[in-house]
Image: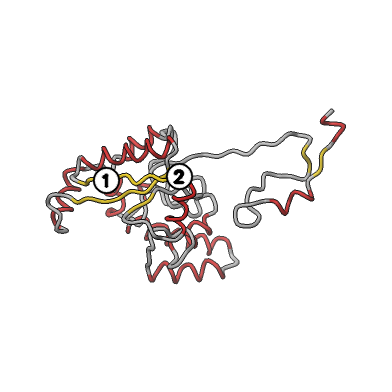
Amino acid sequence: MIGTNLEVFRRFGRAEAFALQCFPCWPGNPGVYTPLEELPAESRLLYDYNPDLAMDMLATEGYPDGFEMDFYCTTDTESMDFAALLQNEWAKIGVTVNIVAHDYVTYRMYRDTFTYTDSIICGTQIGNATGSILNLFKTGGWLNYSQYSNERIDELCVLIAAELDPDVQDSYIKEAGVIALNEVSNIGTYLIPQGYYWWPWVKNYYGEVSITDGGFGELIPYIWIDQDLKA
């Protein structure tokens, strides 16, 4: 992250109004979010863009001339532009990014079977703090595309899933979030806010999006239309 200019990506995503430190927990949830100024020093350093330090770190790890890597993405315009920006930015620290672009179906095949190499673009929700930690960072989590594993986070995930006191659960999530951020299994670049709208005559619907694995078909039989209001 030290070699990644997050301000450039925030401008790209039109997300400059949002917090720089926006991952893995939603800044709008103070129970689980740790502000940048309250992070440990080694974590705060990650947000201080310093390409010279990044190159020194690469050299220390045995890559004085940088290295070459693949970056998987889809062929839609935003993903391709993101990949090109990443390629340009990381070239400044000696990292050659080979863009591996596929149609969405092929991309999903590589992503969901974990058969891509090196790195992959992927958005994720962070509003559900419990889901963010369990799905993104638990060993074997279904959104853990980095195949990241940390013994303490796995312990915390068990506690998070079992805890009924929301304040105690939040404390576990907050601890896990700082650990995951510091170990940089993922680089969260910017927030993409989403909104859901429906006509006022649509009744018994309150904005639910995911009832079963990303779908809400089961809810449809319970939604009704106020014909008088619609008229």
Which amino acid is tagged 2? Asp
| Image disc number at residue 97 | 1
Does 49 appear above or below 12?
A: below
Which amino acid is tagged 1? Val
Does 185 appear above or below 48?
A: below
122 relative to 86 in the view: left or right: right
Mark 1 crowdedness (10 Å alpha carbons): few <14, some 14-19, many ≥20: many
Residue 31 screen position, x and y as percent: 51, 54
Residue 174 screen position, x and y as percent: 45, 58
* Residue 48, picture quadrant: top left
Residue lying farthest to the top in this orientation: 231
For this rendering, which residue is in front, 231 or 8?
231
* Residue 137, picture quadrant: bottom left
Tell me which residue sits at (17%, 53%) in the image.
57
| Image disc number at residue 164 | none
Tell me which residue sits at (27%, 54%) in the image.
42
68 relative to 14 in the view: left or right: left
Question: Which structural element holds mark 2?
Answer: loop
Does 112 appear above or below 104?
A: below
Residue 192 screen position, x and y as percent: 48, 40
Quadrant of the image containing the C terminus: top right
Tell me which residue sits at (45%, 44%) in the image.
103
Q: Distance between the residues labelled 2 and 1?
A: 19 Å
| Image disc number at residue 103 | 2
Mark 2 crowdedness (10 Å alpha carbons): few <14, some 14-19, many ≥20: few
For this rendering, which residue is in front, 144 or 73?
73
Answer yes or no: do the residues labelled 2 and 1 have beta carbons within 8 Å? no
Q: Which mark is nearer the camera, 2 or 1?
A: 2
